[in-house]
Image (cartoon, grey):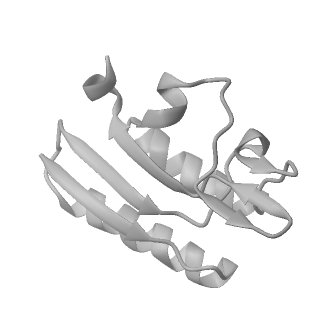
Amino acid sequence: MTIVNIYMPNTKTDKVKTIKKLKDYLESEQEENNLLIVGDFNLIMDEQDCSPPYTDNPGLTTKWNELEIDNDLVDGWRFSHPNERQFTYVQANSLCRIDRMYAVRNMLN
């Protein structure tokens, strides 16, 4: 099993670099059947994960979606709670789910 802990920086430029580094790392590893990627993503993929509803820059979400597809990754919590809204980050005027766990799809079945 491979477990990757990630901290996604806050700026768009740094997020792009982090996603690229992770993509390069995953490509350099042998095919892994049991992969978990966990951490603070600072990336809102779906407006149901933020209140008020919000999603990040479409270019960033597309890059992350490509990484998910290429590695057959699934957001573990969203897989188990497709319609539920809970948040891991609370600020004065917003609530967001930025801490997530991704797993290879076959681990969740």
Image quarter (top left, top right, bottom left or bottom right) of the N terminus: top left
Q: Nearer the viewer, residue 59 or 89?
A: 89
Q: Give the left or right position of residue 83, taking residue 100 as reference.
A: right
Q: Give the left or right position of residue 96, taking residue 30 as reference.
A: right
Q: Nearer the viewer, residue 44 or 61?
A: 44
**Residue at image location 27% in from the left, 60% down from the top:** 4
**Residue at image location 67% in from the left, 54% down from the top:** 61
**Residue at image location 28% in from the left, 58% down from the top:** 26
Q: Residue furthest front?
A: 92
The x and y percentages for residue 68 are 47, 44
The x and y percentages for residue 17 are 51, 79
Q: Give the left or right position of residue 81, taking residue 47 as reference.
A: left
Image quarter (top left, top right, bottom left or bottom right) of the C terminus: top left
Q: Nearer the viewer, residue 69 or 81?
A: 81
The x and y percentages for residue 47 are 79, 44
**Residue at image location 21% in from the left, 63% down from the top:** 28
The x and y percentages for residue 93 are 86, 65
Residue 24 seen in the current view: yes
